[in-house]
């Protein structure tokens, strides 16, 4: 975090000096400032998507790729403010039960058809039926047309977080043609046709996903911020190339084989910064943690989960994951401090206990009898793998028998759905704008790990239907306290991620993942 601040100050100083150098700019400087169109981007991406249907997975690989293809009615700006995207505007009724979306006109799908109210209604209907958020909070809602370009969402009861749920980029409420929604099966969409600045061309398993600039894209003209505002397609082609080996991504970004490489190992950051050919982009990226299988096996017992929480030394885990305290922060809260409406100190006393004696006592109370504990891990995410190794070592120190099962990330995503296959898996979570977006908190979503806490379910309902933010915050304090009692997961701490670009790449953004619209290859 200190490093991020230092880099920001350095950049600020650089711009200040440039501003003081005089009003007149040379013709070569003006030439550099011209927009550059054309070319292709080769992106070395560390993991393969399990599917390209955004409604069927929480995998970030699917999210990061398909956000360039699909769009939603509303979306988030850089500060998680809700902004219109395919909706020109929206209006919430006084009783909070009706949200009216006026649609932008002249929006075309990648198949050349115009977007209309029927497409939006079909898309939202499928989102409600398929996604955990839709099933949990919109099951009794209706989407209806009002004229040719207005869609009305009618809720049975006020849902203060409804717009944030519709804006969320994970399992996003994407708009696709009516016929594409109607032809979808349990395996997902047969065609990936959206309205975004890039259109899907092909997916070659184990090789790449290829996206092509959409010539008829109609961009907003408002300032680009996060996932909102202007999206310009400067480059013609984007190749997300699947490069699971970190050393290969590192070598490729250095030689220029790749224009962009994500998930760069933290111990290589200084090496890359020393090169004038590569730029590092260091972004806050949520947190990592262990997820317990609470449906079967040993960790059905809350005392067993509490034993692990008592045992773990989070700083040792974070240092192994990120190599330098500039890249992580010891932090208990589910929401970050910048989220002033939500941040809570609740449960802080139960974070980073490092108490092996307490852990052994709780293990005995849980009836541990040398059962083999299986941890799922993947080297596709080096920080996940390094954390899993340290967790294994720390649990072995309190007398547990622990096995590390290491797979590629796609296999981990598959195996984590089988309650008989594992006890723990290590994964990461983006910083979410509202508590309900954390998939490990509620029982209804049945996300892997299978949380089953009536207490947390009730508190989530109270948060979502609260009449004010002050009331919602009161319930969130109680929820975070209960989170630390029940322990669906254990949070290690806040983290960053490094995405490296060649020095001629400009305009890359980041919000829960990279954004490549507005990128120019100069």
Image (cartoon, rainbow, N blue to C red):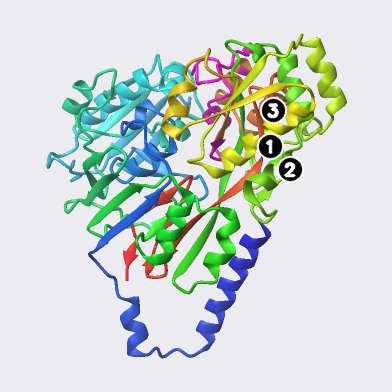
Residue at x 25%, y 40% (from the top left corner): 204
**Left/right of residue 363 with respect to residue 208 in the rendered view:** right
Query: Could you give the CA–CA distance between mark 3 and mark 2, rounded to whole angstroms?
Result: 24 Å
Q: Main secondary structure of the magenta part?
A: loop
Label 3, secondary structure: give it. Answer: helix
Dot 1 or dot 3: first in sequence order is 1
Q: Which residue is mark 3?
A: 480
Query: Callout 1: helix, strand or loop?
Result: helix
- Report the front residue among 1 and 499: 499
- Give the Cα distance between marks 1 and 2: 8 Å
- The magenta-colored residue range is 428-456
Q: What x and y, as percent, mark residue 155? A: 41, 20
Mark 1 and mark 3 in contact? Answer it, CB < 8 Å. no
Q: Residue furthest right?
A: 357
Q: CB of mark 1 within 8 Å of CB of mark 2?
A: yes
Count of number-bearing discs: 3
Q: Which residue is labeled 2 in the image? A: 316
Q: Position of residue 222 (x, y in %)?
A: 36, 57
Q: Quadrant of residue 442?
A: top right
Instruction: Tell me if residue 225 can be seen.
Output: no
How many residues crowd mark 3 within 10 Å: few (<14), some (14–19), many (20+)? many
Please check the rendered image and state whether residue 452 is part of the magenta-colored stretch, yes or no. yes
Expressed as whole percent of the image width and height from the top left, the position of residue 427 reads: 55, 34
Tell me if residue 255 is in the magenta stretch.
no
Query: Which badge, 3 or 2, is on the more N-terminal residue?
Result: 2
Which sits earlier in the primary sequence, circle 1 or circle 2?
2
Disc 1 marks which residue?
390
- The residue positioned 26% from the left and 30% from the top of the image is 120
**Quarter of the C terminus within the rendering:** bottom left
């Amino acid at each position: 975090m200190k490093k991020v601040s230092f880099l920001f100050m350095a950049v600020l100083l650089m711009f200040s000096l440039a501003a003081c150098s005089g009003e007149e700019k040379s013709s070569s400087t003006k030439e550099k400032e011209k927009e550059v169109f054309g070319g292709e981007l080769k992106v070395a991406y560390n993991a393969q998507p399990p599917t390209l249907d955004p409604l069927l997975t929480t995998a970030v690989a699917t999210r990061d790729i398909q956000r360039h293809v699909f769009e939603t009615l509303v979306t988030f700006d850089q500060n998680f403010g809700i902004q219109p995207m395919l909706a020109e505007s929206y209006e919430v009724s006084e009783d909070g039960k009706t949200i009216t979306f006026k649609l932008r006109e002249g929006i075309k799908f990648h198949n050349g058809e115009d977007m209309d109210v029927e497409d939006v209604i079909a898309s939202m209907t499928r989102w409600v039926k398929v996604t955990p958020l839709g099933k949990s909070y919109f099951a009794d809602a209706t989407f209806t047309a009002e004229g040719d370009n207005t869609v009305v969402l009618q809720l049975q009861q006020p849902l203060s977080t409804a717009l944030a749920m519709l804006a969320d980029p994970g399992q996003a409420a994407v708009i696709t043609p009516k016929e594409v929604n109607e032809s979808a099966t349990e395996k997902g969409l047969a065609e990936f046709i959206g309205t975004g600045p890039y259109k899907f061309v092909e997916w070659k398993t184990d090789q790449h996903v290829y996206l092509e600039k959409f010539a008829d894209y109609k961009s907003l003209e408002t300032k680009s911020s996060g996932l909102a505002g202007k999206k310009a397609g400067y480059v013609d082609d984007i190749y997300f190339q699947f490069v699971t080996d970190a050393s290969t991504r590192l070598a490729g970004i250095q030689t220029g084989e790749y224009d962009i490489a994500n998930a760069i190992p933290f111990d290589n950051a200084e090496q890359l910064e020393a090169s004038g050919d590569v730029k590092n982009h260091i972004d806050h990226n949520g947190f990592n943690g262990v997820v317990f299988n609470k449906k079967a096996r040993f960790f059905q017992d809350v005392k067993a989960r509490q034993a692990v929480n008592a045992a773990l030394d989070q700083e040792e885990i974070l240092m192994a994951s990120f190599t330098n305290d500039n890249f992580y922060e010891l932090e208990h809260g589910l929401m970050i401090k910048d989220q002033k409406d939500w941040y809570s100190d609740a449960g802080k006393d139960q974070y980073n206990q490092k108490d092996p004696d307490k852990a052994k006592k709780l293990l005995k109370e849980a009836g541990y009898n040398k059962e083999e504990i299986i941890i799922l891990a993947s080297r596709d995410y080096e920080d996940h793998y390094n954390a899993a190794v340290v967790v294994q070592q720390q649990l072995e120190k309190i007398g547990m028998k622990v096995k590390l099962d290491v797979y590629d990330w796609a296999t981990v995503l598959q195996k984590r759905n089988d309650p008989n296959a594992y006890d723990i898996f290590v994964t990461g979570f983006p910083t979410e704008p509202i508590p309900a977006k954390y998939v490990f908190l509620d029982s209804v979503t049945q996300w892997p790990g299978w949380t089953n806490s009536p207490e947390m379910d009730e508190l989530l309902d109270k948060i979502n239907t609260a009449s004010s933010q002050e009331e919602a915050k009161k319930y969130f304090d109680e929820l975070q306290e209960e989170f630390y009692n029940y322990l669906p997961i254990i949070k290690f701490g806040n983290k960053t991620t490094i995405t490296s670009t060649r020095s001629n790449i400009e305009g890359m953004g980041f919000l829960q993942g990279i954004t490549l619209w507005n990128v120019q290859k100069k």
